[in-house]
Amino acid sequence: MRSRFSIHPFIGFLVVAVLVGAIAGLPARTIVGSVEKGIGDLMASLMILLVLGAMFGKIVAETGAAQRIADVMMQVAGTRHIQWAMAAIGFIIGIPLFYGVGFVLLVPLVFSVCYTYKLPPVFVGLPMLAALSVTHGFLPPHPSPSALVVQFGASMGLTLVYGLIVAIPSIIIAGPLLSRFLKDIQAEPLQAFVARQRPAEELPGTFVSLFTAMLPILMLMVTTLVPFVLPNATGLNKLLAFLGAPSIVLLIALLAAFLFLGLRQGFSPAEITGFCGAAAKDISPVLLIVAGSGALKQVLMESGLSNQVAQQLQDLPLHPLVLGWLIAAIIRVLIGSATVAGLTTAGIILPYLQQSGVDPNLMVLSIGAGSLTFSHVNDSGFWMYKEYFNLSIRDTLRSWTMMETLVSIVGLAGVLLLNLLLH
């Protein structure tokens, strides 16, 4: 039944936007103009970021840099600290890679480790998946947090710094600590999902792999923190403001990956261009979803409904950050998609955010945390995890769903603590 009546989120956003505009009494021409303006305004500032981020991640994956990072982490940690190694791998590789790509790339690594060392797959894999989930929900350049930063007028650099602070306890609690209680889950992953590893001589070096994968994070952190340390260095800060623009950061990172992970590793320009073309194709569904959310947000603002909702929300005895988390969590439970939940919440909460004076960087993280809560049967990630690990519905709920919910709750707690300390 669900597949028979399912509809693509982009179409769903457009239909809802038109219906909301009509119900609110907007003229037909105004509705059309609002839809087009909402799509144009959001995509003008976001499309470059998302497309470059996808291309960058694709090169990191296809050239073997991700495998090199994973191999090195495994050698350093060994079986005794296997959970922490998997969490670190998920976090480092999850920053440049979109969630679906990271999942498909890294889960076979989990199974290889489990078969080699005779370890429970859920025990080994959950920390890595927790890290992937956190980067997907909290950290730019992933679609939802990036779009929220743009819509709220937040700082990409500060959101990233705050997100890294919140991410660490979320990963630890929902990953290595939770999985220790799930050793009894019997999983028999299919052999078809155990990936063939490339020979070591075909992989890029350790330093170049780590440096290139982490380059966007390093640039954003440096360009954000240096002006606080050296506020009087006017010329330097102007240069850093240019270099710290998210589109410039990812453009530089993409060119670095093209050179160091592509050309220097023996890939031809045509092969690397092919990776970029495939990445653009992969990201197109996400671009449509983000564009649709921009249309709905603009209609909500033009109709005045978002302001009415914001005024009603002010009467609720909840902190604005908790409210943003709760709205995103409810939408996530109802529709399943974390990206759609985060972007839909943005249109509802934006007027309230402007009136409340809450730190927009923290609101991005709060909504991101809410959008991850209680993944269940209407979420594609739930079924990917279940089928890859070959689990029952019950065991999927007590491992995957619990992990996602813990990430969400701990993330909210971290945001509230940061807000207390900073404001």
Image (cartoon, grey):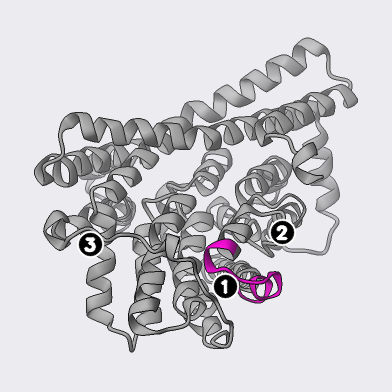
In which quadrant will I find the C terminus? Answer: bottom right
Q: Earlier in the sequence, mark 3 or mark 2?
A: 3
The residue segment tinted magenta is 387-399
Measured from the top left, where is residue 167 in percent x and y?
47, 67
User: Residue sitting at 48 percent across and 66 percent down?
Assistant: 190
Q: Position of residue 334 (x, y in %)?
A: 77, 53
Q: Which residue is mark 2?
A: 377
Name which residue type carries label 3.
Arg
Task: Name the amino acid, label 2.
Answer: Val
Answer left or right for 169 relative to 5: left
Q: Residue at x 52, y 74 (%)?
A: 188
| Front tag of 2 and 1 | 2
Classify the position of the N terminus by image quarter. Answer: top right
Residue 395: in magenta span? yes
Mark 3 → mark 2, Cα distance in angstroms: 34 Å
Query: As rendered, which of 155 and 422 lies closer to the eye?
Result: 155
Q: Which amino acid type is shown beneath numbered disc 1?
A: Leu
Mark 3 or mark 1: name the one nearer the start of the chain: 3
Pointer 3: what residue?
Answer: 68
Most frequent secondary structure within the magenta stretch: helix
Kindly indicate the quadrant of the structure image that contains residue 397: bottom right
Mark 1 = which residue? 417
